[in-house]
Image (spheres, rainbow, N blue to C red):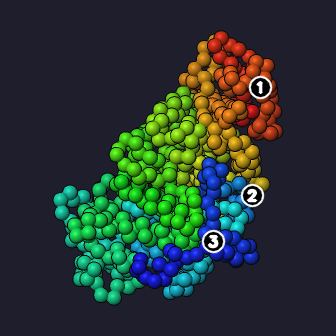
């Protein structure tokens, strides 16, 4: 297929209409964007590992590097389950077609055709391989049914690399990095076999549909770095790096960027997508991140999607400035463009996990957010807007272990409560609600097949119920979605106040919106009950004010005391059992 095919142009310029979904509901096309993405927490699932309605996982064990059989129909089957859980959006792992000969990489991050859907995610993969319209239809049915239930669809995409489409001179799948010049390469056929006379893809006659790179406009050796492996300027393991920085001397343009932008705009129109999560965004040029984010936003606006969402993977555990290069209005440079909307919040995740597990004192999390507030002063229009720029999480597919450990289920509940009440757009990894607890020495341990477990989609599981109730709290309290955020100093003796400086200490922070303060306080100690005095806002909370327990509703124990004045601070005294968390308002 070509990007300038009449059929492609027709889809890009399609007029608004009404769609009748496969379950009989009527929805508008394009489906309208949410007014504010902070209103919808995200459920992240791996398509191959979530569900198959008619088959067991193959093989039925993990860790597993091959396709296990999850598909679009399996996700459709469980949409009511996700709706009941409270998910407002689903982030899908990539669904674009990967080399069909490559069965040991199932994740979808090795695209070879940027306009075609992966047939292995269909009910009949063989038929979908022969007829691309089958895969198109099944994926679109999933998106439409989700929309009919009020659930948005965010697709995982890649700008940085493709699949393993060629090998290097010396018949090597990978080569050491070469800083000067490019290696000679040999493109693979549809069976993955490098062809000795396929050195220049633009010279290959009658290139098979399952070989090379597509769309046709991408078929140019210059569009690949061909330098071997290097984290910042070379291949991503066996996946071949795109030359997104290549500038055509004749046209003075960046052709790879142009073609990727056109392809991903086409996917928005073709499948009515609501957002993109951009894989390995830190490895593309920051100026391309800005151009891409703006191009997606402008195209979506042109067809009636007024708040298309883009967020990127910028894996920096400690560098706030690095994340700020990719998101929002970058005022540090003379750029008028706007970047992608948000970044996955690795720095917050590291601190929240360490604090909730008792590996670090709560003061580290508090100081991190204080520093972030300073770092964002030139980006956000108000302190309350900071949550728009970060997608927060506890675990995902790129870690070696999940947060949850069965012997510490209260710790999981504590961490989930913090996740859903801190600033940011919360993202929960599939299977958390069913207590998946994979851990090991590589990432495959956290990529389990969910439907292969007994009672895999139980709505009675304690963590399912807990997340469902957290979702209701989040929906009921605007301050948790839009409010300013202040970490609170605490004291055990009512005299010395500071952020909790000890491992296993107390996390305390407020979300404030107008005249409403919501106080979240958590005891990360696994053994001891604590009695703690917590600072609150003196303008909102008068002396003698009593607090209501908003969450959990069935909380037992000593009620929070009314507000008093302790020296310069307005405070309230709270008693917390080991690993207990309260939300007060």
Pointer 1 residue? 560
Whether residue 121 appears in this view of the structure is no
Pointer 3 residue? 29
Q: Earlier in the sequence, mark 3 or mark 2?
A: 3
Q: Secondary structure at mark 1?
A: loop
Q: Earlier in the sequence, mark 1 or mark 3?
A: 3
Pointer 2 residue? 84
Q: How many marks?
A: 3
- Classify mark 1: residues with Cα within 10 Å, few (<14), some (14-19) or many (20+): some
Quadrant position of residue 197: bottom left
Q: Secondary structure at mark 2?
A: helix
Seen as rendered, the residue at the extreme left is 180
Badge nearest the viewer, 1 or 3: 3
**At 77% across and 25% down in the image, what residue appears?**
560
The one of 431 and 467 positioned closer to us in this rendering:
467
Task: Give the alpha-carbon distance from disc 1 to disc 3, as whole Å.
Answer: 50 Å
Quadrant position of residue 159: bottom left
Q: Earlier in the sequence, mark 2 or mark 1?
A: 2
**At 61% across and 26% down in the image, what residue appears?**
488
Whether residue 13 appears in this view of the structure is yes
Name the spot of residue 153 as percent of width and height, x first.
60, 63
């Amino acid at each position: 297929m070509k990007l300038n095919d009449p059929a492609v142009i027709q889809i890009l310029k399609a007029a608004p209409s009404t769609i009748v979904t496969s379950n009989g509901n009527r929805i508008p096309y394009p489906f309208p964007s949410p007014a504010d993405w902070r209103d919808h927490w995200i459920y992240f699932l791996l398509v191959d590992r979530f569900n198959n309605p008619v088959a067991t996982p193959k093989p039925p064990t993990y860790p597993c590097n091959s396709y296990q059989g999850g598909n679009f129909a399996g996700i459709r089957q469980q949409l009511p389950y996700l709706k009941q859980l409270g998910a407002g959006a689903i982030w899908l792992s990539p669904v674009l077609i990967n080399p069909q000969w490559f069965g040991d990489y199932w994740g979808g991050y090795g695209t070879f055709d940027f306009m075609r859907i992966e047939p292995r995610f269909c009910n009949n993969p063989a038929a979908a391989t022969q007829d691309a319209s089958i895969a198109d239809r099944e994926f679109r049915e999933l998106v439409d049914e989700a929309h009919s239930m009020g659930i948005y669809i965010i697709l995982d995409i890649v700008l940085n690399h493709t699949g393993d489409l060629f090998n290097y001179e010396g018949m090597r799948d990978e080569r050491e990095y070469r800083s000067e010049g490019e290696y000679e390469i040999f493109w693979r056929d549809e069976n993955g076999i490098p062809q000795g006379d396929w050195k220049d893809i633009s010279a290959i006659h009658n290139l098979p549909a399952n070989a090379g790179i597509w769309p046709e406009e991408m078929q140019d050796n210059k569009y690949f770095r061909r330098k071997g492996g290097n984290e910042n300027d070379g291949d991503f393991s066996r996946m071949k790096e795109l030359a997104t920085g290549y500038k055509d001397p004749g046209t003075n343009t960046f052709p790879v960027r142009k073609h990727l932008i056109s392809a991903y705009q086409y996917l928005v129109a073709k499948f009515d997508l609501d957002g993109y999560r951009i894989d390995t965004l830190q490895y593309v040029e920051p100026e391309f991140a800005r151009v891409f984010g703006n191009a997606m936003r402008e195209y979506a606006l042109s067809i009636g999607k007024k708040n298309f969402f883009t967020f990127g993977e910028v894996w920096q555990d400690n560098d706030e400035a690095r994340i700020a290069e990719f998101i929002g209005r970058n005022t540090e440079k003379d750029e008028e463009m706007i970047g992608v909307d948000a970044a996955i919040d690795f720095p917050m995740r590291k601190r929240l996990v360490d604090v909730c597990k008792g590996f670090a004192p709560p003061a580290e999390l508090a100081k991190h957010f204080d520093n972030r507030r300073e770092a964002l002063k030139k980006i956000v229009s108000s302190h309350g807007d900071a949550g728009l720029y970060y997608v927060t999480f506890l675990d995902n597919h790129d870690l070696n272990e999940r947060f949850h450990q069965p012997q510490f289920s209260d710790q999981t509940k504590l961490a989930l409560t913090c996740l859903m009440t801190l600033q940011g757009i919360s993202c929960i990894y599939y299977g958390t609600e069913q207590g998946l607890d994979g851990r090991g020495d590589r990432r495959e341990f956290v990529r389990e097949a969910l439907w292969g477990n007994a009672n895999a989609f139980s709505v009675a599981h304690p963590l399912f119920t807990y997340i469902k109730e957290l979702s209701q709290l989040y929906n009921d309290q605007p301050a948790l979605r839009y409010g300013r955020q202040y970490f609170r100093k605490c004291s055990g003796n009512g005299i010395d106040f500071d952020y909790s400086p000890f491992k296993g200490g107390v996390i305390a922070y407020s979300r404030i919106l107008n005249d409403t303060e919501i106080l979240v306080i958590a005891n990360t100690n696994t053994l001891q009950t604590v009695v703690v005095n917590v600072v609150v806002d003196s303008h909102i909370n008068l002396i003698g004010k009593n607090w209501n327990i908003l969450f959990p509703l069935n909380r037992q124990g000593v009620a929070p005391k009314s507000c008093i004045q302790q020296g310069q601070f307005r405070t309230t005294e709270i008693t917390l059992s080991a690993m207990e968390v309260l939300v007060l308002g």
